[in-house]
Amino acid sequence: MNNTELIKKGLAKRYRREKRFRAYGLMAVMVGFIFLAILLADIIGKAIPAFTQHWIKLEVSFDPDTLGIDEKSDEATIRDANFNAAVKKSIRSLFPEVKKRKDKRKLAAMLSTSAEYQIRDQFLADPEILGQTKTVWVLADDDVDTYYKTADKSKAVRLSDKQIAWADKLLADGLVKKRLNTTLFKNGDSREPEQAGIRGAIKGSFYTLLVTFLLSFPLGVATAVYLEEFAPKNRWVDLIEVNINNLAAVPSIVFGLLGLAVFINYFGLPRSAPLVGGLVLTLMTLPTIIIASRSAIKAVPPSIKEAALGIGASKTQMVFQHVLPLAMPGIFTGTIIGLAQALGETAPLLMIGMVAFIVDIPQGFTDSATVLPVQIYLWADSPERAFVARTSAAILALLVFLVVMNTLAVWLRKKFERRW
Amino acid sequence: MNATTLLVIIIGLGLFSYIIGRQRSVKLAAAHGGQRKLHSLPKYYGYMVALWCGLPTLIFLSLWLAFEPTILKSMLVSQLPAEMSSLPDDEFSLVMNDLQLLADSGQIDAETDPVKKQAAQQLVDLKKSSSTFRTILIFVLALAGAAWGLGRITMQTRARVFVEHVVRYLLVLCSLVAILTTLGIVLSVLFESLRFFKSVPVTEFMFGTEWSPQTAIRADQVGSSGAFGAIPLFAGTMLISAIALTIAVPVGLMSAIYLSEYASRRFRAFAKPLLEILAGIPTVVYGFFAALTVAPFIRDLGESIGLSVASESALAAGVVMGIMIIPFVSSLSDDVISAVPQAMRDGAYGMGATQSETIRQVLIPAALPGIVGGILLAASRAIGETMIVVMAAGLAANLTANPLEAVTTVTVQIVTLLTGDQEFDSPKTLAAFALGLMLFVVTLVLNVIALHVVRKYREQYE
């Protein structure tokens, strides 16, 4: 057998192997896609129940005796009035057969604890209704809500048999309505899933990112300009460059330790504040912005610089009036990508106390706040089943923000990027 | 006036002095034969005056803000009655905190203790006079600066040169932030770690095999031995990272090979960004996915074949972390594979090798250093990853190599030790900083090695 025959003999095997290798490669890519698809499908599937909420129709009598007020009561007295009793009375009137104390309590627990405040607000808006009976829709408790949403009724474990019977009766009587869940976007955090919302977290994220942007953008661009255009070649500048590259790879949680030790313990800045969160995220985002800005500045062709210098511009004028404006689209793209990373960051913010349970919606940079990813973390830890759906919905909201930011970055690059 | 208002006022004054300075130079030039006789453009005179007005004031304001609390405190201490200032240190700092809170709340009248009331009143007075003093000084400084700047405007003043010098220094200052950050990390972590190592010896921390960071509050408390042996944490971190890498390296590497060598241009243009989405998803989302979907799935799967799987198994966290770093491995490998010169591929094809033979026997060996560098970077990513393990891995420090059991990691322990309110100087909280130091050093070393390897490899083909 000569060489040619030997090679021909092995050829089929080699081709098979080639095909197999290629298939492995395609499989690897597909594995990535499948993971992505499962992840997204899982979260979207879990999030769907969170977008609706069940409301229960009550006939509430604004009886002066039950409430303990009369026409002359001022607003403070009305705020303290016993609306809870009115709510309880009206739900009991639907089920007159319930007599035992324990059962009565269970019956009242089918409504959200926010029901009395809902009624109070309605009363405050129109005090004329004192003594009348009005139809009011109030939020159902999260367990009841979950029960209505679960297709397989045997799995809704958190309701007792009696409660299930009541819930079924309410539904059969047409006293239950499913509405779009606007609470999720209007409220701050709450221990009760049906009252919990992401508004506070979104605002907290907004303030934190604003601080991050205001600090990291000027600092990052200035550093990039200095390193790219002015810096001499010496050991100090090398040190700065090595530092920036290493900072980009430091685990995010270490930045949290820095924030805790320096900003909170040393400088005494307030815990849980967007200000501190923004400072920590600034330090994390800086390397991204610097690296992106440097490559954008580097991409401006020397001919433009030379032309500027040639007609008498000083070096600073050349940089600030010609190079920077031309590099801006690239710099903005890098900044947005850096901010998108900062928006999704959780670990360092846990260290500086942004995990506190905060109901109020933050109004400024030093108010206690939490951010969207931390809210997700907090809800994911909650035992109530209804929080699973709300966590997924919050994740979807976070992903929407990220997609918008990244699309903006891509659009900016496509629209303004110039090829020289 | 508070600091924010002052800041706004300073900016306003700066703008105002810009306008004045500019006008002054224009007027001056008109008297001396036109603007072209002026050394710099009029706006530079404006900038110069604004800088003279704003810069010293801003420096002064930040210094004042930095040192005011300490100075006020020492002034207050010197005025305190003897019975208060002679308290032991920890009680004294408590009292000082109380006074601060009282003074800030503005409800001094509600305080019952007359001594405290008086001291808080003193603090309020001090703060008030300090604030007045600060406002006056700032105005004086700003106006004096502006006047000085205005006085310097002549036909020959080199305003542009001056402004450009200042700008240059500001740029240098900005670029020092990166060094300051690194320094801040090293110092804060190192300093607290040293305090920790005073109470727990380094050798016990590095080589101890028992981790239970509950320190006793009372001496006779049960189960609060406070053992700080970090070996179980290191082992847990390595186990989870190893699982992550066994998923991410083959998948990432193969997809990089497929995308750079086989895929059509169109498929690549669509597949690459899609894979990169995996890297853009926040880690807390992966944590949620791991804890609520993957972990129960693995547990049920294990039970159905008769294995007992912990509900917070290392496997779940590791698999999900692996998914997360797939795009990381693949984009780094893609870079190095594309960097192998075409001539080497052509040589192999010319000898009759098939494409897969070329890849396996020529490209991969040639790109190996780069790939190894990429894997090291991915490993440092996995070691430092926090949210996935916080949400999906356990808290109990088991020393085991069984991926079906629950293990804990360095990052999980840092988070659990530092969230919630504790006093800052117990060994329990300080231990977190020691762990942070280990984490920082290990990831830094991995990165330095990886970058060195990658750079060396790149130079080979340039």
Image (cartoon, coloured by chain):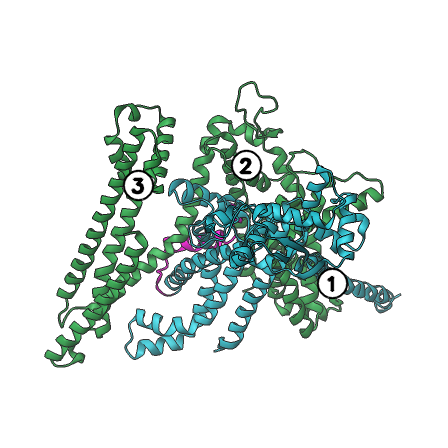
Chain colours: A cyan, B green
Q: Chain of mark 1?
A: A
Residue sitting at 51 percent across and 42 percent down?
Answer: B441
- CA gap between label 3 and label 2 equals 30 Å
Q: Residue B285: x, y in percent?
A: 63, 54
SS category of the residue bearing label 2 = helix
Residue A231 is one of the magenta-drawn residues: yes
Q: Residue B356: x, y in percent?
A: 74, 64
Which residue corresponds to mark 3?
B69
Nearest to viewer (mark 3 / mark 2): 3
* Mark 2 residue crowding within 10 angstroms, few (<14) / some (14–19) / many (20+): many
Instruction: Say if residue B160 shows up in the picture.
Output: no
Residue A350 is one of the magenta-drawn residues: no
Which residue corresponds to mark 2?
B417
Magenta segment: A229-253
* Mark 1 residue crowding within 10 angstroms, few (<14) / some (14–19) / many (20+): some
User: In the figure, A308 relative to A344: above or below?
Assistant: below
User: In the figure, A300 relative to B191: above or below?
Assistant: below
Q: Chain of mark 2?
A: B
Residue sitting at 27 percent across and 65 percent down?
Answer: B164
User: On the picture, is B137 further left or further right than A318?
Assistant: left
- CA gap between label 2 and label 1 equals 40 Å
Residue sitting at 24 percent across and 40 percent down?
Answer: B126
Which residue corresponds to mark 1?
A30
Nearest to viewer (mark 2 / mark 1): 2
Image quadrant containing the N terminus of chain A:
bottom right
Nearest to viewer (mark 3 / mark 1): 3
In the picture, the disc for residue B310 is none
What's the residue type where badge 3 is placed? Pro
Name, please, the residue furthest toward the left: B31
